[in-house]
Image (spheres, rainbow, N blue to C red):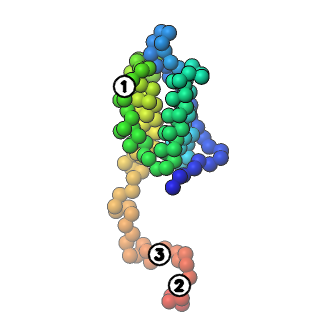
Amino acid sequence: MRERLSDTRHSITHRCKIGTGNDAIKLYITVGMYDDGRPGEVYLQIDERGTTLSGFCICTGILLSLCLQYGVSLDKIHEKLSYQEFEPNGMTDSTTDQLRFARSIIDYVVRWMMDEFATVLCPPASAVPTESSRTLAPTDIAALPSTTSNPHNA
């Protein structure tokens, strides 16, 4: 089932340049987020409006958005699409070492998203409940307030 984003949502926009000189492409990635910070929609734009490449970027953003909204994990998207190599590719102006070279636009997009949203998708170990923190002792259960009325307890 599709999980739609709220009508008003937070987003983040990232700009990068792929390639050098006259062949460089300016790429703008805008990611709309669910209330909990997970990515839920992706818009991709390049500085060459009206070109075939621009159309493919727009369509790729729509497909990534639908994948995320229908429950495909960013991990799975990253696994399948990172390191796909085709033009345009090349050095980037990223300050992140892992993103200094893009093998393609989609390679850069999914690797940037994994880098950007890693803490949301994989919380630090201290935030992940352990088995002992999920298990309540019988005395703890008895101390919990009743949320339903039970005729057998009267």
**In front of the other: label 3 or label 2?**
2
Q: Is residue 138 left or right of residue 151?
A: left
Q: Is residue 73 left or right of residue 7?
A: left
Mark 1 and mark 2: Cα distance apart in space: 63 Å
| Residue 122, percent from left and from top | 40, 45
Write down the quadrant of residue 131 in the picture.
bottom left
- Residue 115 can be seen in this image: no
103 up-or-down from 120: above or below: above
**In front of the other: label 3 or label 1?**
1
Residue lying at 54% horizontally and 52% vertically, measured from the top left: 3
- Residue 120 can be seen in this image: yes
Residue at the far right in the pictured view: 8
Mark 3 and mark 1: Cα distance apart in space: 59 Å
Mark 3 and mark 2: Cα distance apart in space: 16 Å
Circle on res. 77: none
Quickly name the residue at label 1: 85
Could you tell me which secondary element the residue under label 3 belongs to? helix
> Could you tell me the amino acid type at mark 1?
Glu
Circle on res. 150: 2
> Could you tell me the amino acid type at mark 2?
Asn
Q: Is residue 122 left or right of residue 149?
A: left
Within 10 angstroms of label 1, few (less than 14), some, or many (20 or more) residues? some
> Could you tell me the amino acid type at mark 3?
Ala
Which of pointers 1 and 2 lies earlier in the amino acid sequence? 1
Residue lying at 37% horizontally and 72% vertically, measured from the top left: 137
